[in-house]
Amino acid sequence: MKTIKSIFYTISLSLTALFLGACQDVVNNPQVEDFSSDGAPTISKITTVTDLEQGITQSAMGQWVALQGDNLANVTSIHFNDVAVNMKEIYAVRHRINVQVPSEAPSNQTNTLTITTPLGEVTVSFTIDFPPLKVNGLLNEFAMPGSDATVTGEYFKLYGLLGDDATFTLDGKPLTIKEKTDNKIVFTIPSDAPDGAAIVLNSPKLKAPITLSYRDKGVPLFASYDKSYLFDGGYLWTDRSYFSDGTQQGDPTPPIGTSFLRRKNVYSAWTWDTLIGGHFDLSAADSDVAQHTENYYLKFEVWTPNAHPLSTGDFIFWSKQSDDKMKLRWNPASENVSFNTNGTWQTITLEAQSFFRDNNGANTLQVGANDLTIVYQPKNDLDADFAIVNLRFVKKP
């Protein structure tokens, strides 16, 4: 029994020494440990733990900092803004506290640091550099009622959207959440959801709720994608066979109507394929789009089957500009990652102002007829299969 106790004691001492040595490497513990206090805490300087001379007034999340002053031992709480630090993860002596800045956004950002001990409290100004919340929007803004929809972005956890107190509603009614991660939230659209409904994401850590519009029709470029409307009506002059009525083998169900552009083709590199050529009409009721094009997006939905991602090429949009440098180019694989919607529709958002301009950059969009050309040009050989529908102007939030 004595032998077992002796071994246990030796192992405990070894682990303690190892832990303290690790802390020394991470937080640069002071050589002299003084745990006394005889008054309220004070802070004279804040530094990083690797440079104890240069003072700092702000820090990134997760950075280790040294709080220097007096009466800092026996600390009972540390708050960055209103976020409490785990007291088991600090090292505190009389003249210094080593602490890691929390990687959590506050509910109330005051840009302050507060230390509390049994003998008092001190608050100083200190700013944490939080990355901004990024919400890309709905992956498919025209997801069908009753189906699942996905919101993508970044830092959802940081801003409380993964917490139990986060709320997700459509026209004020709670949504059923299927999945939540730091960069996406999946929920089910109610079967009776109307077009134009407001999807609202909120949490106590957000300064204001995030509102997304569901199936916002905006200002459509075409009232229908039926061949009879587009070609017999004189809007397009390009190949009628590029448009499907939804009855071809492998056709997806479109987000609106029954017809859409579907191009299934084996391309050679640098082929110039005019998908759409013609014009659309902008009514006087929608003159604001022409007068303030900079306030609008050009949106549309794209589909690719799982086996045919878009790995190369540009979709080239233009109206009246002839200078190739002035044309709007959308490269689905711009980040060297193939674009694949995996058999679902996905919303694409572009700047309308970049589409409708002349060679000098001046706006050309007008009430009445407007020229419209969309070309696909792959940079490499490609066995392609893709669909496009629902071109529209949508006002920016």
Image (tube, rainbow, N blue to C red):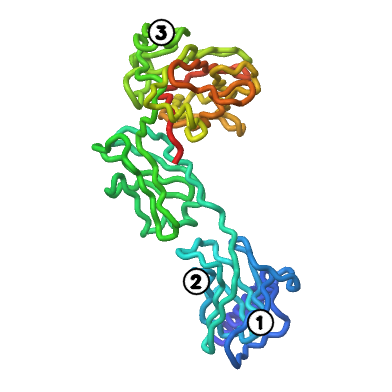
In the image, residue 51 above or below residue 220? below
Of marks 3 and 2, which one's residue comes earlier in the chain? 2
Q: Amino acid at mark 3?
A: Gly
Judge by depth and name the residue closer to the eye, 396 or 265.
396
Q: Is residue 267 visible?
A: yes
Judge by depth and name the residue closer to the eye, 364 or 396.
364
**In the displayed structure, does residue 87 sit left or right of residue 345?**
right
Q: Residue furthest left?
A: 192
Q: Which residue is mark 1?
A: 69
Q: Amino acid at mark 2?
A: Ala
Q: Position of residue 35 (x, y in %)?
A: 62, 88
Q: Label 2 vs label 1: CA separation?
A: 20 Å
**In the displayed structure, does residue 250 sit left or right of residue 108?**
left
**In the displayed structure, does residue 322 sit left or right of residue 172?**
right
Crowding at dot 3, Cα within 10 Å, few <14 / some 14-19 / many 20+, comes out as: few
Q: Are marks 3 and 2 in contact (CB under 8 Å)?
A: no
Of marks 2 and 1, which one's residue comes earlier in the chain? 1
Q: Which mark is residue 234?
A: 3
Q: Which residue is mark 2?
A: 84
Q: Quadrant of the C terminus?
A: top left
Q: Position of residue 104 (x, y in %)?
A: 51, 62
